[in-house]
């Protein structure tokens, strides 16, 4: 890695820790111009925001710190996402996906990364956003004829919502037609198995590989 690349990646990390939206956007633009893999740039910010989350968890940092760091990350993400989409343009459609963060949960960053990578890989994705209940997911699955559901949950208090959605899908006899992928910081492989989801992965690139596997692509 050359010095300039190192500096750009360091600045993305620094921008997250210092809640510096301008530095985040500027460094993201520089990283695209320099041809740095946008996934690598996103990884740097993801690692930084997780460190901030851990410090919040132990009481060293406060909610405004989470807000500041996520604002900085969200200043860079659209610039990096545009580049991810550009690099993955003109692919065949691999499947119809409905995605969202579950009811009671407003964390959007990871879910949006998964949506971006799925779109770049060639899936047609309807991103419902955050705070989506079972009814909302099922309505969208029927509306768009989706064959894959992507659910994100970041809190131990909200990942149980994923279980409700899986149960509702079975009730509506959509269980066979729609594969279900779950993820987000609060979810584990074991939890995914317990609730009857078809797959789990801890990363956004892993989510793409899993989606392809589940749909036989
Ligand atoms: C940023 C952040 C926020 C921001 C969110 C901004 C936004 N627009 O998203 C704000 C400040 C708004 C926020 C609010 C809150 N937060 Co918060 N937040 C975080 C933080 C620091 C980072 C989350 C994040 O964006 N990570 C980066 C992304 C890229 O990671 P990710 O989402 O996990 O996604 C990756 C993978 O999981 C995977 N993935 C994601 N989705 C999916 C889906 C599928 C299908 C697959 C396969 C993979 C996959 O791909 C991604 C890329 O690799 C976490 C700490 C942490 N360790 O997660 C706390 C954290 C999640 N928050 C927490 C809390 C408590 C809250 C609040 C309740 C605080 C409060 N007192 O108000 C509120 C919740 C409000 C609500 N109802 O949702 C706790 C949850 C604890 C718990 N109970 O489990 C955490 C863990 C912090 C902590 N250590 O205590 N938060």
Image (spheres, grey):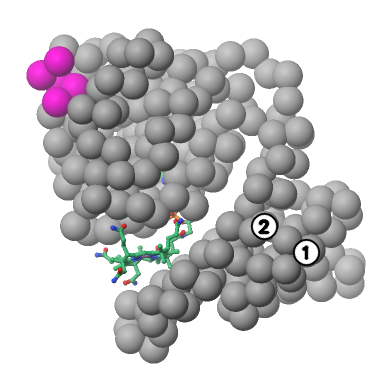
Whether residue 213 is visible to the viewer of this picture, yes or no, is: no
Question: Do the residues bearing badges 1 and 2 touch, measured as CB atoms within 8 Å?
Answer: yes
Whether residue 176 is visible to the viewer of this picture, yes or no, is: yes
- Quick check: 132 above or below 62? above
Confirm whether the magenta stretch covers residue 142. no
Q: Circle 2 is placed at which residue position?
A: 76
Give me the C-alpha separation between circle 1 and circle 2. 8 Å
Q: Which labelled disc corresponds to residue 37? A: none
Which mark is first along the chain, 2 or 1?
A: 1
Q: Residues within 10 Å of mark 2 (few under 14, many from 20)?
A: many
Q: Of residues 117 and 61, which is closer to you in this image?
A: 61
Q: Residues within 10 Å of mark 1 (few under 14, many from 20)?
A: many
Q: Main secondary structure of the magenta part?
A: helix
Q: Circle 1 is placed at which residue position?
A: 27
The answer to which quarter of the image holds residue 177 is top left
Q: Residue furthest left?
A: 171
Along the horizontal axis of the image, is 215 left or right of 39?
left
Q: Of residues 193 and 77, which is closer to you in this image?
A: 77
Residue lying at 27% horizontally and 20% vertically, measured from the top left = 139
- Quick check: 207 above or below 203? above
Quadrant, the N terminus: bottom right
Disc 1: residue Cβ within 8 A of ligand 1's nearest atom:
no
Q: Position of residue 58 (x, y in %)?
A: 32, 83
Q: Position of residue 69 (x, y in %)?
A: 53, 71
Q: Under tag 2, what secondary structure? A: helix
Q: Which residues are magenta?
A: 168-172
Q: Position of residue 212 (x, y in %)?
A: 49, 24
The answer to which quarter of the image holds residue 132 is top left
Confirm whether the magenta stretch covers residue 169. yes
Residue lying at 35% horizontally and 13% vertically, measured from the top left = 143
Residue lying at 67% horizontally and 57% vertically, measured from the top left = 76
Disc 2: residue Cβ within 8 A of ligand 1's nearest atom:
no
């Amino acid at each position: 890695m050359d010095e300039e690349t190192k500096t750009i990646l360091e600045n993305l990390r620094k921008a997250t820790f210092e809640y510096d939206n301008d530095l985040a956007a500027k460094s993201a633009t520089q990283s695209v111009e320099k041809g740095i893999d946008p996934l690598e740039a996103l990884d740097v910010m993801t690692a930084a925001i997780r460190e901030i989350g851990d410090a919040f968890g132990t009481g060293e940092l406060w909610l405004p710190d989470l807000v500041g760091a996520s604002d900085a990350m969200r200043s860079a993400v659209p610039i990096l996402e545009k580049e991810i989409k550009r690099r993955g343009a003109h692919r065949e459609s691999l499947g119809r996906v409905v995605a969202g963060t579950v009811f009671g949960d407003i964390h959007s960053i990871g879910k949006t990364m998964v949506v971006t990578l799925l779109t770049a890989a060639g899936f047609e994705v309807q991103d419902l956003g955050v705070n989506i209940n079972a009814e909302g997911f099922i309505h969208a699955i029927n509306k768009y004829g989706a064959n894959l559901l992507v659910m994100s949950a970041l809190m131990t208090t909200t990942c149980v919502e994923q279980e409700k959605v899986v149960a509702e899908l079975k009730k509506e006899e959509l269980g066979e037609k729609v594969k279900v992928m779950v993820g987000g910081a609060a979810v584990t492989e074991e939890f995914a198995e317990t609730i009857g989801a078809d797959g789990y992965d801890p990363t956004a690139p892993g989510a793409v590989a899993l989606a392809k596997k589940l749909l036989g692509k």
